[in-house]
């Protein structure tokens, strides 16, 4: 029991780390996000390799989100699993590219902090307001007309079902599930149950999963021992062995198809003008270190139904 609490604390703390890294890269000009600084105060400067890695992560995921929204239109939903302090809802709102419903789920201790920041900042709360909707808050949950933030343990499916009902989820709409560095912390059986449940309930769905890959080599072992050193058990790490295991995780759990790319491939697929721009922001001491880092993260996608079949990273 003591171990479990320690692991949960450590897992929740990974959100602070991710948010601080995003804040740092935004501040340096890697990409634009007017909202991340409302969730994270000043942070220490990170290594150039980390900033570039985060650039590839945010931009790579953005490619798929834009494809999803283009393919499904406004009548769609996004469900962000383990959303942490992600600012996607506000960025899409400013780009006038919001789906019909946007749901964020994380442990209650994380969502309560997110609720606190949203309440404190006019720039955040004003964007939740719509003409027809009221905003209701509890300590951990927030409901607005088309945005719902809720505290939950994703390993508990009946709780998930209950929370999604509160968020008025529509199982018939095209739905994007997003998990950014989340499933590695959830044990394999619980992830299987979650993926099977989603697969059964949603007819037309796309899943975008960003996380570690190639964890069985030397560099991967060092990454894992660093994370374990912070107290994370990494209960889902078995599926981070290779691109194949990442894809199989979906196809054995009822999803129709899956594809996966290392972040080297994702980075190379980004617009060359964007890469040239950000490569001028900071000099890299060691190009090799960046390549190794990018080889050890991936984006996997999986689909159910006809709309998103064979969706790929290629742009244009
Ligand atoms: C590395 S952080 C990533 C946060 C966000 N997705 C991002 O990329 O900025 C992982 C998040 O997953 C959440 N998480 C992990 N396991 C979870 C579970 N069983 N239930 C709910 N949230 C979970 C953590 O609390 C944390 O906020």
Image: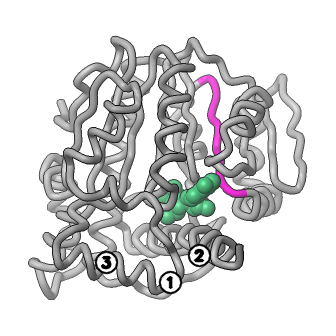
Disc nearer the start of the sequence (2/1): 2
The quarter of the image holding the C terminus is top left
Q: Is residue 18 magenta?
A: no
Res. 24 image quadrant: bottom left
Label 2 to label 1, Cα distance in Å?
Answer: 7 Å
Residue 11's place in the image compared with 104, above or below, is below
What is the x, y in percent for residue 12? 62, 68
Taking 76 as reference, is 311 left or right? Answer: left
Give the crowd class for mark 2: few <14, some 14-19, many >=20 residues within 10 Å: some
Residue under circle 2?
Answer: 10
Label 1 to label 3, Cα distance in Å?
Answer: 11 Å
The quarter of the image holding the N terminus is bottom right
Give the crowd class for mark 1: few <14, some 14-19, many >=20 residues within 10 Å: some
Q: Which residues are magenta?
A: 100-107
Which of the numbered marks, if any, corresponds to residue 93? none
Residue under circle 1?
Answer: 230
Disc nearer the start of the sequence (3/2): 2
Residue under circle 3?
Answer: 223
Disc nearer the start of the sequence (1/3): 3
Residue at 59% over, 75% down? 10
Label 3 to label 2, Cα distance in Å?
Answer: 15 Å
Residue at 27% over, 69% down? 52
Residue at 80% over, 45% down? 142
Q: Does any portion of residue 64 appear in the rendered image?
A: yes
What is the x, y in percent for residue 78? 55, 33
Give the crowd class for mark 3: few <14, some 14-19, many >=20 residues within 10 Å: some
Q: Does any portion of residue 34 appear in the rendered image?
A: no
């Amino acid at each position: 029991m003591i171990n479990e609490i320690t692991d949960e604390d450590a897992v929740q703390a990974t959100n602070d780390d991710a948010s601080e890294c995003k804040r740092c890269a935004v501040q340096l000009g890697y990409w634009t996000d007017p909202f991340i600084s409302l969730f994270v105060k000043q942070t220490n400067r990170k290594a150039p390799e980390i900033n570039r890695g985060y650039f590839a992560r945010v931009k790579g995921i953005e490619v798929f989100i834009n494809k999803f929204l283009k393919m499904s239109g406004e009548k769609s939903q996004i469900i962000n699993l383990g959303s942490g302090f992600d600012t996607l809802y506000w960025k899409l709102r400013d780009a006038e590219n919001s789906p019909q419903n946007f749901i964020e789920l994380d442990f209650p201790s994380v969502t309560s902090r997110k609720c606190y920041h949203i309440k404190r900042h006019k720039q955040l709360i004003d964007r939740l307001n719509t003409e027809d909707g009221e905003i209701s808050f509890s300590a951990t949950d927030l409901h607005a007309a088309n945005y719902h933030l809720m505290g939950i343990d994703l390993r508990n499916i009946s709780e998930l079902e209950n929370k999604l009902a509160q968020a008025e989820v529509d199982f018939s709409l095209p739905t994007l599930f997003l998990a950014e560095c989340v499933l590695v912390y959830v044990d394999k059986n619980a992830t299987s149950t979650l993926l099977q449940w989603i697969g059964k309930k949603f007819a037309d769905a796309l899943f975008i999963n960003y996380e570690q890959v190639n964890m069985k080599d030397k560099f991967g072992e060092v990454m894992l021992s660093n994370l374990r050193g912070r107290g994370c058990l990494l209960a889902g790490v078995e599926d981070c062995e290779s691109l194949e295991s990442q894809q199989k995780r979906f196809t054995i759990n009822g999803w129709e198809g899956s594809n996966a790319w290392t972040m080297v491939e994702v980075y190379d697929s980004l617009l060359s003008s964007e890469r040239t721009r950000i490569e001028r922001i900071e000099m890299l001491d060691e190009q090799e270190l960046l390549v190794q880092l990018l080889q050890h993260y991936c984006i996997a996608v999986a689909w159910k139904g006809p709309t998103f079949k064979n969706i790929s990273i290629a742009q244009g």
